[in-house]
Image (tube, rainbow, N blue to C red):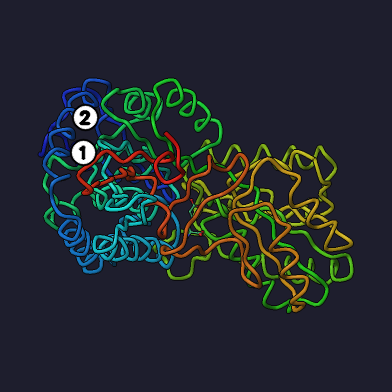
């Protein structure tokens, strides 16, 4: 019988009186990883009330001391890295090297947050008046709602939770129902590091129930969400109506451009990793390859030769290159796009089938898939699939590549392979995306740089690096007039009055 897990509400792990859902291994759905509470509005209300108490206490802890807690979280995750990575692979499927990287991204984020505790800069600027100081300070906001996806079950929650905490907020955290165990492991690490219990609340369950109850709760003034553009729009409507601060990180249709002068072997390693790493289930995944006609046929052949050799399997096995998809719906969606692509007249050059053979019979495997001759503006070329499907578009120039690249609703990550420095800089300027890589694939963002996208990928905020701290804090401006008389800005110094 699989272990039954609890929510963390009001400073303790609480047994759930209602229904539970099962968390299963996507590489073998017969294995139940655990049973988790199906929470509802009642649990959310209790969690928010407790988090408000946590907030009142935590906001008064000096930021460097809050940073100390996050440094210890980094230490705990470092110590438990291997064990957590194994549990994550069993829960969400990607190979161990990738789940180790995912934990490492959380560790990096923890240490970065710890050091930010000794910065969290405000500014002091000259006043236009004598004997007067003018400055800005940063203040926490309140209870932050954090709603996260399955694909980076550790890194993405840490991108939100650690800066939120460092800034002095309390957090109500709802991990995706496909990866509740990793969410629980993260909360355990926070508690082990000495985070005061009411500052974090963990609620399991679905987005439509728990997620929306968090977003709609008047006690939650800020929300950070990573997920689909469709759900993001719903959250945006609620948060707009309720005047909440909202950070959205959503879809992508990222492209890699390969020019004729590129190092093709390098580009080949890049596109394989970008398109099929995490089984294509990354917001940053390379889902379009804009391939210059002069190298098109040669590169496509090299690519297919390598792709068909990728080994599908259980991510816990050292022989596995590509793990399963997260669940049945994800695999069905991928299969549906393969049908759409075929109907649109694109040429299926490899893959296009669920994983075959007894070894793969009980997992959500799908073969790495490549379509060639994909037409700009076709659905295959425009829509996010979130699976192992790469669409190859033939292009004739850098200008054409830039145009095709930009002609989608999303703008997260992008990549160019070339040895021509002029082309590189032209593309850095021309591509509509939050991230551009030169001679590296579209995936692989580092924790200490801002992460996010333009157009319908986001709503203007950035995670990671120094910018996320602006989202999780509010500016207060302070003027101190020690002149001992009324001084009128805009008037006295300009001879007015
Ligand atoms: C995501 O897909 O939501 O740059 C995050 C990358 C990772 C993070 C991806 N470091 O691919």
Residue occupied by mark 2: 48
Which corner quadrant holds the C terminus?
A: top left
Determine whether, in the image, residue 237 is placed left or right of residue 189: right
The correct choice, above or below, for 421 with respect to 447 in the image is below
The correct choice, above or below, for 240 with respect to 157 in the image is above
* x 39%, y 42%: residue: 492
Residue 442 is situated, as x and y percent measured from the top left of the image, at 60, 61
Labelled pair 1, 2 in contact (Cβ < 8 Å): yes
In this view, the residue in front, 367 or 1, is 367
Q: Residue at x 32, y 50 (%)?
A: 136
Determine the residue positioned at 49% across, 57% down: 323
Q: Position of residue 436 (x, y in %)?
A: 63, 62
**Is 331 rendered above or below residue 271?**
above
SS assignment at label 1 = strand
Q: In which quadrant will I find the N terminus?
A: top left
List the residue tagged with mark 1: 201
Whether disc 1's CB lies below 8 Å from ligand 1 is answered: no
Crowd around label 1: few <14 · some 14–19 · many ≥20 (10 Å): many
Query: Horizontal placement of 382 versus 314: left or right?
Result: right
């Amino acid at each position: 019988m699989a272990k039954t897990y609890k929510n963390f509400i009001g400073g303790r792990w609480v047994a759930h009186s209602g229904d539970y859902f099962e968390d299963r291994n996507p590489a073998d759905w017969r294995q139940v990883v655990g049973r988790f509470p199906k929470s509802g509005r009642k649990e959310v209300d209790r969690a928010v009330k407790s988090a408000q108490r946590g907030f009142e206490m935590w906001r008064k802890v000096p930021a460097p001391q809050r940073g100390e807690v996050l440094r210890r979280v980094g230490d705990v995750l470092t110590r438990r890295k291997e064990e957590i990575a194994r549990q994550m692979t069993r829960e969400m499927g990607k190979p161990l090297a990738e789940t180790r990287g995912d934990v490492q991204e959380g560790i990096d984020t923890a240490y970065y947050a710890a050091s930010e505790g000794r910065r969290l800069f405000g500014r002091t600027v000259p006043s236009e008046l004598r004997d007067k100081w003018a400055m800005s300070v940063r203040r926490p906001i309140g209870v932050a709602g954090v709603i996260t996806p399955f694909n980076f079950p550790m890194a993405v929650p840490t991108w939100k939770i650690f800066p939120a905490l460092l800034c002095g907020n309390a957090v109500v955290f709802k991990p995706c129902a496909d990866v509740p165990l990793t969410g629980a492991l993260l909360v355990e690490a926070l508690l082990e590091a000495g985070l005061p219990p009411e500052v974090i609340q963990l609620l399991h369950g679905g987005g439509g129930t728990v997620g929306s109850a968090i977003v709609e709760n008047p006690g939650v003034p800020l929300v950070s969400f990573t997920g689909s553009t469709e759900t993001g729009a719903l959250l945006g409507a609620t948060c707009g109506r309720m005047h909440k601060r909202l950070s959205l990180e959503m879809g992508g249709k990222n492209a890699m451009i390969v020019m004729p002068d590129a190092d093709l072997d390098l580009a080949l390693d890049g596109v394989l990793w970008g398109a099929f790493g995490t089984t294509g289930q990354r917001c940053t995944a390379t889902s379009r390859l804009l391939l210059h006609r002069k190298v098109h046929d040669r590169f496509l052949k090299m690519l297919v030769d390598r792709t068909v050799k990728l080994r599908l399997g259980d991510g816990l096995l050292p022989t596995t290159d590509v793990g399963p998809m997260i669940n049945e719906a994800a695999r069905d969606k991928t299969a549906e796009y393969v049908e759409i692509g075929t109907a649109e007249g694109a040429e299926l050059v490899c893959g296009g089938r669920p994983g075959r053979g007894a070894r793969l019979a009980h997992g959500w495997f799908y073969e790495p898939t490549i379509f060639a001759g994909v037409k700009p503006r076709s659905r295959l070329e425009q829509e996010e699939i979130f699976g192992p499907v790469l669409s190859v578009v033939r292009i004739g120039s850098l200008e054409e590549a830039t145009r095709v690249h930009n002609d989608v609703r999303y703008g997260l990550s992008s990549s160019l392979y070339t040895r021509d420095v002029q082309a590189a800089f032209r593309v850095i300027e021309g591509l509509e995306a939050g991230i551009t890589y030169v001679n590296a694939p579209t995936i692989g963002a580092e924790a200490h740089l801002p992460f996010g996208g333009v157009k319908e990928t986001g709503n203007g905020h950035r995670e990671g690096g120094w910018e996320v701290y602006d989202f999780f804090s509010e500016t207060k401006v302070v003027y101190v007039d020690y002149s001992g008389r009324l001084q009128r800005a805009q008037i006295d110094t300009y001879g007015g009055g």
